[in-house]
Structure formats: C-alpha cells, structure tokens
Amino acid sequence: MLDTPVTGKRQVARGMFVIGMHAPEIASAVRAGQFVNLGWSGGPILRRPFSVYRAEGEHIEVVLKAVGSGTGQMLAMEVGDRLSCLGPLGRGFEFGGGAREAVLVSGGLGVAPMLLAARDARVAGMKVTWVHGARTAAELCSEMDGDTVIWATDDGSQGTPGSAVAAAPDADLVIACGPNRMLAAAAERWPEAQVAVETYMGCGTGVCLGCAVPLKRGGYDRACKEGPVYRAADIDWDALPSHLPYAVVA
Amino acid sequence: MSTDMSVAVGGMKLRGPVLAASGTFGYGTEVPLLERRALGAMVSKGIFLRPREGTAPPRIAETPSGMLNAIGLQGPGADALVRDYAPQWAEWDFPVLVNINGESVSEYAELTSRLDGVPGVAGFEINISCPNVEQGGMFFGNDPRAAATVTEAVRKRTKLPVWVKLTPMVSDIGVIARAVESAGADALCAINTFVGMSIDLNAYRPRLSFRTGGLSGPAIRPLAVHLAHQAARAVRIPVIGIGGIARAEDALEFLVAGCTAVQVGTATFVNPKAIAEVHDGIASFLEARAFRSLADLPRYLPRD
C-alpha cells in the first residue's frame, strides 16, 4: 500500500482522462491486465479499482471516466494530491502460448489494459493488432499502440461501423476488454480469448468475496484474485451483471 | 514502558483487544498485505458444514459511509477448512475462532463436533445473525428460545470458548443476550450487520441480486455502540463490540460503552493495516492519559 502523489492528468477522449501517479514498486512489477485499488482522503468508503494503463520508470497511469461521485472526485484532483494505491492486484494476461500475433480488442474504457498488453505481447515476440471501438469518434481513445490499427464506431463516424468485436480479425491470441456485453459477444466468436471482466469490487484483495464472477462449471470465483482475466469460455455470461456504475476497467 | 493491552475475553487471554471480524479477513491466509502484528484474534469467514456457492452478483453496493453485502456465506465447507486452513492457524501467534453456521440446530451441532479438537481451531463464534441466507442465520438470532437452543447445542459439543454473534434486527437485544448467556455462551459479539436495501434507478430494481444485504461501515457505528452497550448492561459475560470501527477513537467508544474487546471489519477492506492502526491508536490514547493498562480505562456501564 503506497501513499502516492498524482503526477499528471491528460484527456484522451471526450470524458476520458488519464491520471498518473508515482508508484515505483508497482510500475516495475505490474503485468498487463492487473489493477490497482485506489482510495483517497475524503473519498468514498470503498476503494476504486483501475487497470494499470501505462507503467514507465517509477510512474503508473490509470484511465477513467467520471461515472460516479468517486471517479468525479478523482478527476478533480490536481498534481500533488495524494492517492492511496494498493497493488498490483489480480492475475493479468498470459502471453506464453507461442502465438505470433496478438489481437487486442477494446471497447470504450476497455482500452485501459491494452497499452501494457501491447508491450507484453511484443516482449513475447508477437505482432500487435490494435482494435478499438466506441459509440462515436469523439469517444475513441486517442492513444494507441499497434502494428495494425483498426477503429470501430457504433455510429460509423470513424473506422468500421459497428462493434470492435465485429471489426477485429481472427488470431491465435485474442485479448479483449470492455463492457461485459461486448465481452460476451467476444466469447461467442473466440471461446479461447483472454478477457478482463468488470465487476463490483469491495476489498480487491480476495477477502470480501464481493466481486463474484459466475463460472460455466458452476460456482463463483473472485475477479480480484483468480481474475480479472479469464478464458472467455469459462464465464457464465448470462449470470454476469452487464451494467455497472464503476468497474475494474473504469 | 508499554501499555498492557491484553484482555481476557470469553475463555481466552488475548494479546490485544482488536480482533478481525468474520468475513473481512477471509481465512487469514489470502492476503500478505493484511497486517497481523497487533491482531488479538481472528474470526474466520463464516462456514457451513458443507460447501456453499453463495449468492449471485451483484453482491455488494456502496452506500453513504457504508456498504451493503449479500455474499450468502460462500465457503468451502468444514472438511476443506480442516484440511487447508486449520493446520496454518495452528502455527500462528494469535488464536483463530471459526464462525459457524447452520440451517438447523443439528447442523450447528454437527459442525461443532467436526471442528472441535482440530488443531488450529481455538474457539467458535456462533453466527445466528447472518441476514443473507434463506434458512438459519438471522432466524435463530431474533428469537430468544431459538438462540438459546443453538447455543446449548454447540456448548454441549465443545469445551472451547463459545461466542455468539448477535443480530441488531431485534426489538430488545438484552433479551437475546440473556438467553444465550444462560445457555452457556462465554461471550457475545454485538453486532452483525443491519438489513438494508438500495435501489438501482436505471434498472428499477434492487442493486443487490439478493434484494437485501447487510449494512456495515461507519454508517452503523452509533447504532452499534448503543446495541453493544445495551447487551453489555444485560449480561455478566464479556461483550465484543462490532460496527463501523475504522479508527482507535471508534474502538474506544465501544470499550468505554462496556465492551471488553472489539472487532474491525469493513475498514479492513479499505485499509489492510486498519487493525494494527486501531490497536496502536488505543495504546497511544491510554499512554497519553497515563493508564498503565487497558483494564484501567474508565467504563460507562451503569447497572439497572
């Protein structure tokens, strides 16, 4: 658990911002798909989980939208304000399967783990196809990292009209993150995809059992511990809540 | 000169008065981040005889200064607890009590027999107050005869300390407290969560899939201090205060109100070091006022 200063803030899409913080231990250890649980003085009672967006040197970044009062408070923070940062938490994406190409499919805030995923895929010797979708052009994240880049918008204002899942090519390794409904569609097309799910989360450390993810084989496990990355076919998508005010990718 | 923080509570001598509340510390093995240094004792996540899946998500919802949860006592069952966790507990320098649950009196009894004598199991906290199970739980906690029957059944099957965790969802907690004291409880834990509900205005339905959940966190603290105080006035056995404790001052309120020890719960979710900070804060408070031991702290506990 680190007490860390906010070191920067920038906008990457309409309503979407990146916040940086000084967190050396986390920056050097974090893997794509892992998250941090952030709290702050005067903030809400529970911490807020965020995928780590970028990790460079002694700094990490997270990406967020103001979806509730908690994230609203975070966006009002200025450089030097303090965050309590717990992490890195959870199990990230696996890049050890020997695939030659990784397709990274994200919708909206689901872009959050993808810069690190691109980094880790390249380290594993893969080419990266970056597929990113949003409702409209203004909501596409302006930052990207891919040998090939594909855009998709619901209204067709930029790139392929329709969803990011529909716009993506097939590959040996597909990694997806976004709203749970998008991930359910990804699971139909690529049962072996690695997906990072969004859930409500309490502690982020495995003890509260609040972030239950329903499994196809029956029962639940914890997004914060066994997840948030899953093999797409392992999740019981019908039982996973699809609309969340904040989420591990938010 | 360090302050003597030890307490005798419900058949146990503990090194400190700050305990980990059931369901907020797992089985104590999950998280290296959790600070154990100052832990007086740990109460395990609630367990049933057999494995339970728990409730469907969403299971938690944040509320003003608190949270609702309906986990539904997800757990691996007694055999897994004995195999996977108890051997680790046996090595630790603080005692672990098991929070036991059942859908019937005989199930509580059978679970007690299964766990009694297992190295690592130092005592029992009978959960007659879980609001998130369809059968058992709170049903036993709001009827004095049922509460006493469960307590007796457990008492008969173990010589280890037996604590009983009470629900606040009663008209007179003193009646229940006296009933379980007479039935042989060594201590009372007051209180478990309040039943609450929160509505999702986008979906026009409750935010929790279980509809209702248990409310915890600072939101319930004054209610909890009052109920723990009422329980303490009703019985001679020790009362362990629970409800929204996040800082030393919160714990001290319960202690002055008549509690012998406290449990910290929801605060651990936010701050994995909460228990150690509460413990250290109590010690500093006592030291600053020149009390040599926690036993010297003045209590407000008028007897009727």
Image (cartoon, helix red, strand yellow):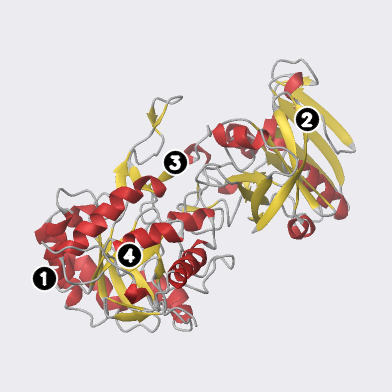
Q: Identify residue for label 3.
A: B61
Q: Name the residue: 19% across, 53% down.
A: B139
Label 3 to label 1: alpha-carbon separation: 38 Å
- Image quadrant where residue A28 sits: bottom right
Specify whether B75 is left or right of A68.
Answer: left
Please rate how many residues cluster around mark 4, counting C-alpha atoms within 10 Å: few if below 14, some from 14 to 19, many from 20.
Answer: many
Q: Identify residue for label 2.
A: A12
Residue B23 in view: no
Q: x and y percent of residue B3 in the render?
A: 45, 78
Label 1 residue SS:
helix
Please state which amino acid type lies under the numbered disc 4. Answer: Leu
Q: Name the residue: 38% across, 63% down.
A: B263
- Residue A168 vs A102, above or below: the answer is above
Label 2 residue SS:
strand
Label 3 residue SS:
strand
Q: Identify residue for label 4.
A: B255
Please state which amino acid type lies under the numbered disc 2. Answer: Val
Sequence order check: which comes first, mark 3 or mark 1? 3
- Taking depth in this image into account, of A79 and A176 the one nearest to the observer is A79
Label 4 to label 1: alpha-carbon separation: 23 Å
